Every structure is written in structure tokens, then in C-alpha cells.
Image (spheres, grey):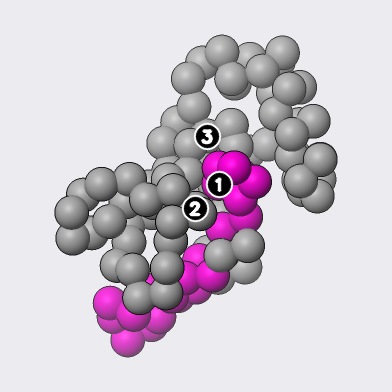
Amino acid sequence: MLKMKDNRDSASSELELKAKNEFLIAHKNEKLAAMAPDIITTVSSDAGKCVPAEKIMEGNKLVVLGILAPEPWRSQKGLELWREVMQRSGTDESYIPIEQLVG
């Protein structure tokens, strides 16, 4: 589990990411923000390069991106596979597409 703070404005927020080889779920201020199979990735704000979960270090300046999963992962069969992955990692939340969580 990775916790990050956004201090760009006076109303700072906290982002919590849960990973198992890749980021599986993100909560912003304890509210669901994104989850697999949608893609959650961290990018260095300095170099613009992807930073995998295991390479993140305190002090990194990162941007967190949420990207719609490819359609096969959003199909019934794809979601069944991801449900198993999520359950094995200790997450029992039902999938909500990222576009429904944004805003």
C-alpha cells in the first residue's frame, strides 16, 4: 500500500494506492477513485517516465494517471478474471468504471 499527498493547493488531498505487481485500486481522500481492470499508473512529473510501484521512493514527484482498460478486460469474462485477482489481493469491491468515478 502506498500513500501519497497532493500539496499543490491549500486543500491538500491524500491518494492511497494498493498494488500487487501493478496498481489495483486507488482511493482519494478515502473515496474510490479507480480500480482494475482500468489502468492506474504513476509517472515522474520531472522526466515523464512511468515509475513502477516497486521503484517509488519517498520524495518522488509523481503524477498518477487513470486510463480506461481495453474493452476485452471490461467484458463479462474479463471482469470475472479481474474479480479473482482483486479477491486474492484482499479487495472485495465490485468494479466501477473509472469514467463513473471521475468528477
The residue range painted magenta reads 3-24
Residue plotted at (81% across, 40% down): 87
Picture coordinates of residue 7 (x, y %)?
34, 80
Please state if 36 lies on the left or on the right of 59 as rendered.
Answer: right
Q: Nearer the viewer, residue 90 or 26?
A: 90
- The N terminus sits in image quarter: bottom right
Q: Nearer the viewer, mark 2 or mark 3?
A: 2
Q: Secondary structure at mark 1?
A: strand
Picture coordinates of residue 14 (x, y %)?
49, 73
Whether residue 33 is visible here, answered yes or no, is: no
Residue plotted at (59% across, 20% down): 73
| Mark linked to residue 23 | 1
Farthest front residue in view: 55
- Magenta segment's dominant SS is strand
Is residue 20 found inside the magenta-colored segment of the image?
yes
Q: CA distance from mark 2 to mark 1?
A: 7 Å
| Mark linked to residue 38 | 3
The residue beneath circle 2 is 53
Q: Residues within 10 Å of mark 2 (few under 14, many from 20)?
A: some
Specify the amino acid type for callout 2. Ala
Q: Secondary structure at mark 2?
A: helix
